[in-house]
């Protein structure tokens, strides 16, 4: 603005050059944008302007960034590099990070339970006895959970197959399908946890 429009690029600061380059890039008719740490050297106002412009971008956007606030709500898919492997997760960075936190907590909890179980096991200790009705109830819970798991895994696989089509995200109702997909994955985790608990209880009761 003002006299700034007459400045040469050579005298601009790093942040000013970044904003200028981004403005030029967004004005060109590209259908693919690959951005590596685009918020570096940008102030809060500039980041907000950039994010709004990217949200209006109709093409495919690939962003590498450590700025969680900037990424929030900007993407609908997150790619994770872990253990020298590539993992793709549907949903934005907040959904991914929340899910990872839950997975980590579950791993720690399972590890703690396994350790306590190992420490408390006594070969001479009598196996916990349960009634015939309780055993039947556990077996029925395991069977129902296995059927649910099979159904949910099939529905999730169908969604993931449909999502391989680039046109999936532009078809009417895709947002509802994506939401349903995420809900089914969450439900699958709950059912698998219930199945595991029932299986452990039945094993501890003995044959």
Image: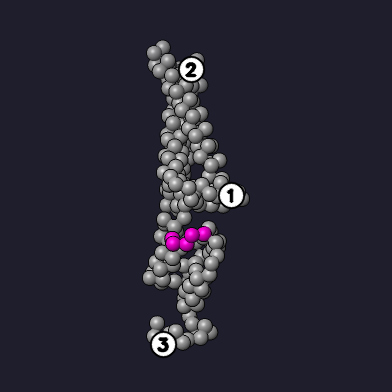
At which x and y percent is residue 46?
Answer: 41, 71
At which x and y percent is residue 81?
Answer: 56, 52
Disc marking residue 206: 2
Mark 2 vs mark 1: in front: 1
- Which callout, 3 or 1, points at the residue further toward the start of the chain? 3
Q: Is residue 35 above or below residue 135?
A: below
Q: Nearer the viewer, residue 201 or 76?
A: 76
**Which residue occupies 43% across, 45% down?**
173
Label 2 element class: loop
**Which residue occupies 44% across, 57% down?**
74
Asked if the residue under mark 1 is in contact with the one under mark 2, i.e. CB atoms within 8 Å, the reply is: no
Q: Is residue 97 visible?
A: no
Magenta stretch, overall SS: loop
At which x and y percent is residue 53?
Answer: 44, 65
Q: Which residue is mark 3?
A: 3
**Which residue occupies 50% across, 69% down?**
26
> Residues in magenta?
55-59
Q: Which residue is mark 1?
A: 86
Cα distance in 3D space between marks 2 and 3: 83 Å
**Which residue occupies 53% across, 67% down?**
29
């Amino acid at each position: 603005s003002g006299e700034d429009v007459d400045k040469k690029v050579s005298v601009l600061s790093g942040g000013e050059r970044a904003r200028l380059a981004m403005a030029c890039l967004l004005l060109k008719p590209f259908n693919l944008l690959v951005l590596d740490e685009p918020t570096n050297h940008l102030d809060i106002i500039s980041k907000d302007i950039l994010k709004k412009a990217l949200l209006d971008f109709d093409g495919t956007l690939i962003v590498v960034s450590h700025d969680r606030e900037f990424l929030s709500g900007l993407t609908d898919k997150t790619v994770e590099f872990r253990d020298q492997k590539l993992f793709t997760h549907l949903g934005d960075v907040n959904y991914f990070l929340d899910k990872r936190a839950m997975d980590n907590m579950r791993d720690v909890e399972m590890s703690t339970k396994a350790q306590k179980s190992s420490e408390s096991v006594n070969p001479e200790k009598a196996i916990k006895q349960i009634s015939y009705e309780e055993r039947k109830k556990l077996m029925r819970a395991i069977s129902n959970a296995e059927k649910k798991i099979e159904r949910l895994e099939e529905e999730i696989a169908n969604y993931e197959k449909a999502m391989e089509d680039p046109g999936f995200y532009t078809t009417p109702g895709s947002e509802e399908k994506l939401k349903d997909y995420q809900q089914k994955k969450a439900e699958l985790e709950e059912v698998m946890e219930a199945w595991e608990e029932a299986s452990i209880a039945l094993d501890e009761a003995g044959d």
